[in-house]
Image (cartoon, helix red, strand yellow):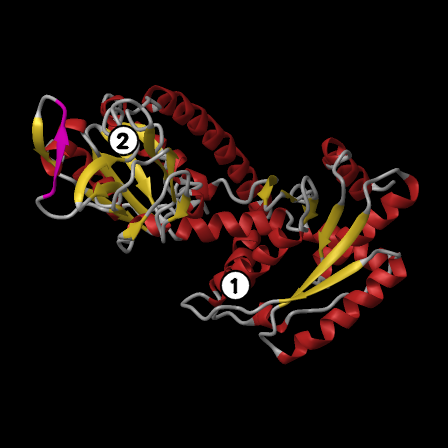
Amino acid sequence: MNALHTRLYDALQSWRDAPGWCVALSGGLDSTVLLHLLASLAQRETLPPLSAIHIHHGMQAVADAWPAHCRDLCAALSVPLQVEYVQVAPGASLERAARDARYAAFAARLGAGELLLSAQHRDDQAETLLFRLLRGAGVQGLAGMPVSRALGAGYLLRPLLDCSRTELLDYAQAHGLVWVDDPSNADERFSRNYLRRQVLPRLSQRWPQAHNALARSAAHLSEAQHLLNELAQQDLHAANVPTDFAWLPMPCLGLPALRELSEARQRNALRYWLRPLTTMPDTEHWAGWQALRDAAPDASPVWQLASGELRRSHDHLWWLAGDWLRSPPSPDIFIEANQHLPLTGNGVVHIQGSLPVGDWQLGYRRAGEQIMLPGRGHRDLKRLFNEWRIPAFVRDRLPLLRLDNQVVAIANLPGLQGAADGSWQLHWQPLSDDQGLS
């Protein structure tokens, strides 16, 4: 094996048990070399089943010929190929929209534990670091592209990040490989192309090891980010305190533990916690966190983020997304015992037990409504919810049961959710917040 084979083989050792390896094949130099390297290794080593996937964006006429080129290449190497056609959503950044469409197709393609192999190399890593540095990225962004990460049901691996483009070009020429050139890579209106064609060559003229140095800096920053993640995990462990509402399924944190941290550690912990839920806010937008944290105790502050909202209620932070941001339509439906009723935009309710004969109706609270409490008389629902410290975002969607138009039960609240003798109870399973995970 030559040097590239050896490095690739070493990079893939811990992934030998994956149920399948799939190469992201654009038809360009980098992915063509990666596919050829893997096909060569497969002739000498016992590897997981190897396949390839080509994503056709339909953004330029010349690309219509690339699927046929990829089919010919894969046929020559006896590698199965799947071609996926995607639609690129219009937007301010065509590059980002194409990338999002591409990775969504990759994620949909991967089965459980399968591996997508992508051909980014050291020069790409240097370019990524410089691009993000000019955008004012933090440590997470400046850490560059990770060697591996979760993708759909499987994983994305970049096994050539330690190799230069020159090495890949030398390999391709030595083996007589043929690849396609994307003309959009020459369009310097795209920032990354401008960096690749104008800025990095000049840096390399002055500092010949510029690509290596930038990639090395990305590796150092990646290590620093791992340490920050470990610190965030420790801080979040202290903030992961139970609430009185275990039936609420959305992510939640205790605010007092966060308040004890420095400003920088608060932001670090919240970045780690929010990262699976939403894109990160820019520096100026973090003022929303301070306003949420420092609002008066009786306030109901909201910090709006890209994919949802962070709300505060009685020293707890709650993440809301999807249907939790919309008021559900009132059901106002008649109900019988032992029914499971789906509520539009609001989960499922269940009457457990036998309801007495009567005009039973399910709905949400109305202004000025009261409930009769044994030994306490009629109590206003608003004051009752204040006593129970019910989060404000739950109050107007908490299912109620009325008998002859009078509230007699409130779902999930012990002592208020059914008959005093336990013969029937009103249970509510709220919406899961999974739809808010990115």
* Residue 47 left/right relative to 94: right
Prevalent SS, magenta region:
strand
- Mark 2 neighbour density, 10 Å: few (under 14) some (14–19) many (20 or more): many
Q: Residue 379 at what x, y percent from top left?
A: 9, 32
Is 183 colored magenta in this rendering?
Answer: no
Q: Residue 200 at what x, y percent from top left?
A: 53, 56
Task: Say what amino acid the circle numbered 2 marks.
Answer: Gln
Residue, disc 2: 417
Q: Is residue 406 above or below residue 101?
A: above
Q: Residue 60 at what x, y percent from top left?
A: 60, 77
User: Does residue 194 appear anywhere in the picture?
Assistant: no
Give me the C-alpha separation between circle 2 and circle 1. Answer: 69 Å
- Who comes first in sequence, dot 2 or dot 1? 1
Q: Which mark is residue 255?
A: none
Q: Which residues are magenta?
A: 369-374
Look at 36% across and 50% down and name the residue there.
343
User: Which residue occupies the extreme bottom position in the image?
Assistant: 61
User: Which residue occupies the extreme right position in the image?
Assistant: 44
Look at 41% across and 42% down and name the residue there.
339
Look at 89% across and 38% down and name the residue there.
45
Residue, disc 1: 198
> Which of 405/229 is in front?
405
Task: Say what amino acid the circle numbered 1 marks.
Answer: Gln
- Mark 1 neighbour density, 10 Å: few (under 14) some (14–19) many (20 or more): few
Mark 2 or 1, closer to the camera = 2
Q: Quadrant of residue 70?
A: bottom right
Q: Secondary structure at mark 2?
A: loop
